[in-house]
Image: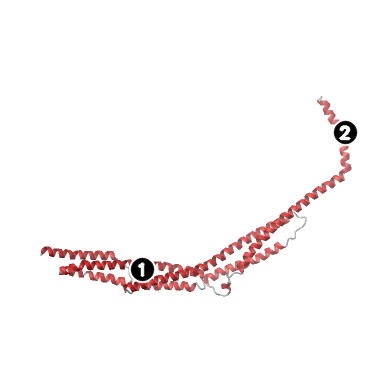
Amino acid sequence: MEEAVEQMLGNLLSDLAPVLLSFLLANIGWLLLALVVIVFLIAIAGWVIKHKLVSGWWRRVVSKHDESAGKLNAIITSDTFKGLEQGFVQGRTERTLSQLEERLYALHRQSEQLRNQLTDRKVPFFSLVEPLIRINRLDRNVREFSRQVDRLAHDVSGIARAEKDTIHSVRQAGARFSSVSQTIAQLMERTGYPLDELNRELGRVETLFRQAEQTSAFDTVQAQSELTPFYRSIDVLSGKIEALQKQLTIFDEMRNRIRVQSEPLVSADANAAAVLNRIDPIVQRLEQSLRMGRSIDLRAAASEIEHLVQEATDLVEANRSGA
């Protein structure tokens, strides 16, 4: 049975082969034409897809470039470099602005080159790969250009912000200096002491402040650095003033306590009075240091005075016991 089926199929194929071959030979022209049409349609579809892809990509690249070029133009027309052009800045600020200006004009030239390349969209009509290669290269260049513009904008914004911060810092420094000066003046008025050492140190602090203030008029970058020693010095001075105020309070209390303790002892015994007279030079030495605005060792002085008061007290008690 199987052999019969195989024989029938073999006979059928033998009969169809000449017919199919004859059909192909008779219609080969039409078949080739159909193949050409199919290939042409595929090519047209490829060109259409390529055109849409490249056009959309191109528009995005142009938009990215226009955005970055707009940022660049905004920097060019800003007031950041006017001081440099008019010769109003010097020193570190001048060098920093000059470097930024060089970067600015280099990017401006690069922007014009990219604009020309993006304007020229002539490519071979039948090329599928070259437009993609070209727009990909332009895309990379525009992205790098955009990153450089962003970095420049950040640096320009930084120096503009630094200028405002310096002006604000100088004003704060001036207010701080005035406050410390007023505190010393009030302390002099209250105590009647000249406070020579504090005033000398205040003069050094004022010199640092005036130097930073003058520098800020033409070199804000350098002025910010010069404010650092000013703040360091005025912090030290403020600490000395605070310590002196506390010592003055303690000294007044100590002097009142000495008077209260000494009065009954002086009237009670001459020897005790002689011992207590040794306290006066100690108090005078302390007061002289305070008059100069100099820090003193109150603890050691208080210990010495307490020892003398105790010695005088012992003499009085011994005298009373003997009596």
Q: Residue at x 25, y 70 (%)?
A: 283
Name the residue nearer the viewer: 202 or 35: 202
**Looking at this rendering, what residue extends furthest in the top direction?**
1
Name the residue nearer the viewer: 8 or 51: 51
Mark toward the viewer: 2 or 1: 1
Q: Is residue 296 visible?
A: no
Name the residue nearer the viewer: 317 or 189: 189
* Residue 313 percent location from the top left of the image: 18, 64
Please identify the quarter of the rendering in which residue 54 is found. bottom right
**In the displayed structure, would residue 89 be above or below residue 58?**
below
Q: Residue at x 51, y 70 (%)?
A: 220
Residue under numbered circle 1: 241
Q: In terms of secondary structure, where does tag 1 sit?
A: helix
Residue under numbered circle 2: 15
* Residue 133 percent location from the top left of the image: 70, 56
Task: Work out how far the residue at label 2 is from the one at label 1, CA to CA, in angstroms.
Answer: 123 Å
Is 72 placed left or right of 236 in the picture? Answer: right
Q: Residue at x 49, y 68 (%)?
A: 168
Is 3 placed left or right of 239 in the picture? Answer: right
Please, what is the three-letter code of the amino acid marked with disc 2? Asp
* Residue 303 percent location from the top left of the image: 25, 63
Q: Earlier in the sequence, mark 2 or mark 1?
A: 2
